[in-house]
Image (cartoon, helix red, strand yellow):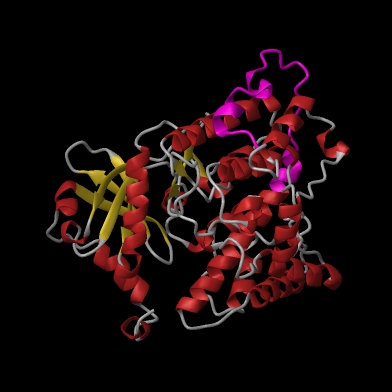
């Protein structure tokens, strides 16, 4: 942050928000009317915007800082190359600074129905048949992107949004900020930058510079594994370096007990996606023809472990909020480590006399984030986390364990894929989904 911004630490964010609402000359403000704030991040804010003539509703991603305009140009370029597909978030219009009052604005399809995992954990039962429909839609979107010579490079649950309140297969792939074009002749990504989210990183992304569209297939395999058994294929309590080592060595333990209630075809499907040798890994197009997705006789299909998935999802949401608090404190000039945040959480839980599953209670959240100098608690995702089993307990030993595990979860080595995307406002449609 530049020196000019640092002089106004207390109100710079509010100033930016007020400035966005001023109608200034330019094609964007001639065409669209900005509405309520859907979300804000380190690099951009997202607002509802309505076309003045058609009254169609979109999500406007507003990038104020010139430092992030190149990234916005890249994302718009990638989305333009992809074009239109039912399972891919759409870019309606893109406005450069001269046309948007000195800022860059991306007008995106508004996807207001939330994240896929959030929908599923509200169910009492989630069957393989339902999973088949969901994953067919996901792979259809991926296969289309790959056919257009684009790799997403940051596929994860946060980037799978729903456009329908009732249809779990209404998936929209979003956040193409880290996407790369693919060389049609070699099949390899032209952008060799190692970015993305560590838990979903393919072995070749970690250990080499030779990778292509199949890094997305690996990430989809991790998502499928979690969707069916309720936890990741690699121990989420490992340190970042240990996790990368496990991924490269493909140390996946397909425990018989966890897969007992699922069909053999489901396990085979996941294993074809999580091949450590990318040459042996199936392509997204090949997976659409897999017997598990094509089987008309699904009488032997079982049920996913929704209870375990609820716990995983709650932990995922909490980690995202912890990262947000750390970022907020950095912006305000306070340096708070992961351990500081985890310590505040455990002290608040212990002081309230409650268990870790009560982290969603406002009194506990206020106490925790108050210790960090944050006036307002992160409201939505933590409040919605109704189960945080194993996150912390009333026992100090468990609280210390949580603090240590959370610190490991949120750390990443310098030579590994970068987990910046959780802090990026390139997560524009995630914010839009919060309405």
Residue sticking out furthest to the top: 297
Q: Out of 53 and 179, give the one closest to the viewer.
A: 179
Side of 23 relative to 423 (left or right): left
The image quarter in which residue 130 lies: top right
The image quarter in which residue 43 lies: bottom left
Q: Is residue 59 visible?
A: no
Q: Out of 219 and 407, give the one closest to the viewer.
A: 219
Q: Position of residue 336 (x, y in %)?
A: 59, 79
Reply above or below: 359 against 430. below
Which residue is at a point 60% across and 22% down the rendered structure image? Answer: 289
Residue sticking out furthest to the left: 25
Side of 213 relative to 105 (left or right): right
Which residue is at a point 33% across and 62% down the rendered structure image? Answer: 70
> Number of marks in the image?
0
Q: Out of 169 and 119, give the one closest to the viewer.
A: 169
Residue interval drawn in magenta: 281-310
Q: Position of residue 435 (x, y in %)?
A: 44, 48
State yes or no: residue 307 in magenta: yes
Reply above or below: 79 against 360. above
Q: Position of residue 305 (x, y in %)?
A: 75, 38
Q: Is residue 261 visible?
A: yes
Side of 161 relative to 57 (left or right): right
Residue sticking out furthest to the right: 257
The quarter of the picture where the N terminus appears is bottom left
State yes or no: residue 284 in magenta: yes
């Amino acid at each position: 942050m530049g020196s000019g911004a640092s002089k106004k630490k207390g109100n710079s964010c509010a100033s930016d928000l007020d400035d966005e609402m001023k109608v200034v000359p330019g094609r964007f403000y001639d065409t669209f009317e900005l509405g309520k704030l859907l979300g804000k991040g380190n690099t951009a804010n997202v607002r509802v915007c309505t076309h003045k003539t058609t009254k169609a509703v979109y999500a406007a991603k507003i990038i104020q800082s010139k430092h992030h305009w190149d990234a916005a140009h890249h994302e718009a370029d990638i989305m333009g190359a992809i074009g239109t597909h039912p399972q891919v978030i759409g870019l309606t219009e893109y406005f450069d600074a001269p046309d948007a009052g000195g800022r860059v604005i991306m007008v995106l399809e508004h996807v207001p129905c939330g994240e896929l995992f959030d929908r599923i954990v509200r169910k009492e039962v989630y069957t393989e048949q339902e999973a088949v429909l969901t994953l067919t839609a996901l792979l259809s979107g991926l296969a289309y992107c790959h056919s257009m010579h684009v790799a997403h490079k940051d596929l994860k649950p946060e980037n799978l949004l729903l456009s329908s309140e009732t249809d779990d297969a209404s998936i929209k792939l979003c956040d193409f900020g880290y996407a790369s074009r693919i060389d049609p002749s070699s099949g390899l990504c032209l952008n060799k930058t190692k970015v993305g989210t560590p838990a979903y990183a393919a072995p070749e992304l970690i250990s080499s510079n030779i990778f292509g569209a199949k890094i997305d297939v690996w990430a989809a395999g991790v998502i499928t594994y979690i969707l069916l058994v309720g936890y990741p294929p690699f121990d989420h309590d490992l340190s970042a370096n240990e996790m990368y080592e496990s991924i490269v060595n493909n140390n996946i333990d397909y425990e018989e007990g966890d897969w007992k209630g699922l069909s053999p075809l489901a396990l085979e499907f996941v294993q074809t996606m999580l091949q450590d040798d990318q040459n042996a890994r199936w392509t997204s197009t090949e997976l659409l023809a897999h017997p598990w997705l094509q089987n008309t006789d699904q009488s032997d299909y079982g049920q996913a472990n929704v209870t375990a998935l609820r716990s995983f999802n709650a932990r995922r949401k909490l980690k995202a909020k912890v990262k947000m608090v750390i970022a907020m404190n950095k912006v305000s000039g306070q340096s708070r480590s992961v351990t500081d945040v985890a310590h505040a959480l455990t002290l608040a839980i212990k002081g309230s006399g409650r268990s870790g599953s009560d982290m969603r209670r406002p009194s506990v959240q206020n106490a925790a984030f108050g210790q960090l100098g944050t006036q307002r608690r992160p409201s939505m995702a933590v409040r919605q986390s109704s189960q945080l089993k194993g996150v912390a307990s009333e026992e100090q030993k468990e609280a210390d364990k949580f603090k240590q595990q959370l610190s490991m979860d949120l750390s990443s080595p310098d030579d590994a894929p970068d987990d910046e995307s959780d802090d990026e406002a390139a997560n524009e449609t995630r914010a839009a989904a919060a309405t």
